[in-house]
Image: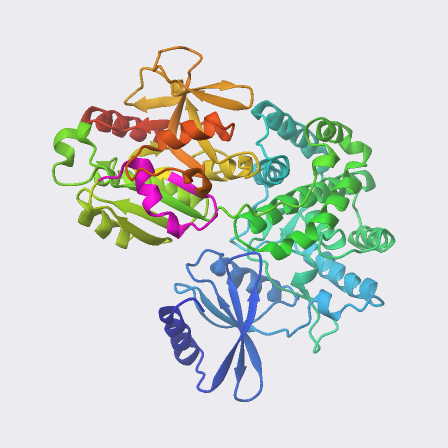
Amino acid sequence: MQNKTRLAQIKSFLEKNCGLKKYKILSMGFDASSRKYFRILKDNGKTDVLVDDEGCKNHSKEFVIIAKFLLKNGIRAPKIRAKDLKKGLMLIEDFGESDFVKVADGKNDKELLRKAVDVLIKLHKVKEFPICAKKMDKQVILDNFALFSDWYIPACMGKNLDENKRQEFFYLVEKLMPEALKMPETLVLWDYHVNNVMYPKDSQNAAIIDFQDAMRGPGLYDLASLLEDERRNISQKTAEELKEYYFTEMKDLRRQDFEKAYAYMALLRHMRVLGRFTTLITVSGKPSYASYVPHGMEMLKRSLENPMFREIKKWMEENFAESNWGIPKNKNITKAFVLAAGKGTRMRHLTQTRAKPMIEVAGRRLMDYGFDLLKNAKINSVVVNVCYKKEGVKKHLSVLKDFDIKISEEKELLETGGGIKKALKYFGDEPFAVINADNILLDDGYKPILRQAIDVWDEKKYDILLVLCDIKNIYGDHPKHGDYKICGKTCLRNQMLVADKEFRYVYVGVAIIHPKVFAGIKEKKFSLRVLFDKAEKEGRLGFLLSDRKEFLVGTPEAVKETELLLKAVKK
């Protein structure tokens, strides 16, 4: 349990909402979400499961609605003993240690899987839907294919897909969609895999858990998830037999439509899961999922052999050859430094009573936009330097949620490089992100900009990686010239500050830095530009080209222009 406040909430829930007096709380671990599970051992020897969805981020309300729907239609799901959805707490029926992985012994796999298929057959004959079930439409499908193109591929290649190649990929998967999905609409449980199928001792039938993300759509996605699960090596013969069993029992399905829809859903499943495992390994800090990736790669390879996917396979060979497939690695960029010490003299009267990062732009503090970048990238361990009008900055930082913030106070301004050098003790020997608290980068693309930078980061190649933006996408205080030009795989700084069209890229105040670049720097006060030039000279400066809009907000005039532009964006 994370903290005393949460423990008190759980204790109150169990005693007041559930009527328990004597009980023990036993940890059961976690799943792919942020939920936590605890087995509640009551004084009569019976047990229930406490679901802790702190922050209410995992659709607990939908879980309750769908559980009732399943039970009403004769499908075993956990009964809800008690709930306080505002606090993200539920007490539900305990099916024990009875999921497929724990019950299967190598001899009964087929029998157990058949029971799980029976659940789908029964569910897919139901003609109604729970009121909360949204449609698994074209956009949902493409968004889940994007987990493969935008997360797994970059994690393996060390670079993001060229946008034209990315759009080619979506064109190919979308082109097959209508023909492949000529199947009746059913309830799609979405996470119907071996760890979520249970076999309670008091029942001859399988039971199901973890269905809060269920949708209306092609139910064959669940069949493919079950029979071609990345977590379990199920023989092709068994999978084919059970697939045929489903087809026969459902009746009235056209063979050609069935085969195409199943193949397409299996491809979606394998690409989506490889992308999802990537986020769990690299963002959520759950390395155990890496063990499933090799089998996932084999399942994807098998799917691509289907003649139906000839064009997609060709695209893969040209843009993501099998030799590049691998296990995503966590690059240990989990901390950040936010530069918030400066006064911002060009802001004139706006910084007479407050530091520049505290200036309001479109109803928010300037520094809040920088914290958005960190929140989107799920980086919550942050060091912030303060100096000018520091008490106001510290007070604001104290109320920011979702972050573990440490303050580095400066008696005098140490400039950008000196400020970070003073706080190096917080980072050890690990690379970290750097954010300027007085710029605004609209992080509204298909993947958080910092996660893209982390994909490109390679400690063997770089000491520093800069996020650069085309000068045409710079607003507010529009610069007279760019900071860098691209020369092959490196970038060169505009030392002469000339307005040359080759120098078309501007540093937007977002970077990744390795502490070792500070070695040999004796000065206490210096600009980060010193380190950028050092890395460039040593061939250790990398870059990521951003396609986002960047607002350089350094004057009162730029504040007004930015506010007008941001309002237009929101509309």
> Which of 55/518 is in front?
518
> Which of 303/557 is in front?
557
Q: Which residues are magenta?
A: 413-434
> Which of 163/543 is in front?
543
Horizontally, residue 157 falls left or right of residue 344, namely right
Does residue 5 sit above or below 483 in this rendering?
A: below
Residue 423 magenta-drawn?
yes
Q: Which residue extends farthest top? A: 500
Does residue 49 sit above or below 391 in this rendering?
A: below
The spot of residue 323 in percent (x, y) is 74, 35
Quadrant assignment for the C terminus: top left
Horizontally, residue 125 falls left or right of residue 209, namely right
Residue 502 magenta-drawn?
no
Quadrant assignment for the N terminus: bottom left
Residue 442 visible here: no
Does residue 103 sit above or below 173 in this rendering?
A: below
**Which quarter of the figure has residue 175?**
top right
The spot of residue 7 in percent (x, y) is 40, 72
Residue 77 visible here: yes
**Which quarter of the figure has residue 119?**
bottom right
Instruction: Tell me what residue is drawn at x 40 percent, y 38 percent.
Output: 520
Q: Exactly how many numbered labels are in the figure?
A: 0
The spot of residue 44 in percent (x, y) is 55, 89
